Amino acid sequence: MSEIKDFHAHVYYSEETLEQARVLCEAARDKFGVTMGRMHKQPVGPHPCWSCQLTVDPETIGPFLSWVCLNRDGLVLCIHPSTGSDLAD
């Protein structure tokens, strides 16, 4: 089993929900100190729609998950561990 370095939380959105997603991502960044990636306006990599990646430390994932579940306001997230093997992750 690989070691988990961190977690990626990909927030999915569309043109209509872009600002809602930006508010969520910036709030997560400010509240938890997570690293916020770019707000992509096209599908990137394996992601089927526009997205923004939040990188969350293993120590923070529990409180982050509780918070984001209560604050996502209908936005869809894909959350996975990051072990250094991008394809497997």
Image (cartoon, rainbow, N blue to C red):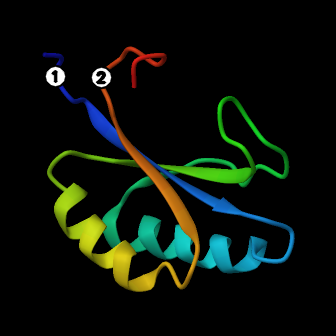
Which residue is labeled 2 in the image? 83
Q: Nearer the viewer, residue 33 or 77?
A: 77
Asked whether, in this view, residue 78 is left or right of residue 38, the answer is left
Q: Nearer the viewer, residue 38 or 12?
A: 12
Asked whether, in this view, residue 25 is left or right of residue 22, the answer is left
Q: Quadrant of the C terminus?
A: top left
Q: Position of residue 22 (x, y in %)?
A: 66, 71
Residue type, mark 2 in image: Thr
Do labels 2 and 1 touch, CB within 8 Å?
yes
Label 2: few (<14), some (14–19) or many (≥20) C-alpha neighbours in 10 Å = some
Q: Position of residue 84 (x, y in %)?
A: 35, 17
Numbered disc 2: secondary structure: loop
Q: Quadrant of the N terminus?
A: top left
Numbered disc 1: secondary structure: loop
Which residue is labeled 1 in the image? 3
Asked whether, in this view, residue 2 is left or right of residue 25, the answer is left
- Comes first in the chain, label 2 or label 1: 1
State how far apart marks 2 and 1 are (Cα). Answer: 6 Å
Which residue corresponds to the image point at 53% horizontal and 85% vertical from the top-left? 73
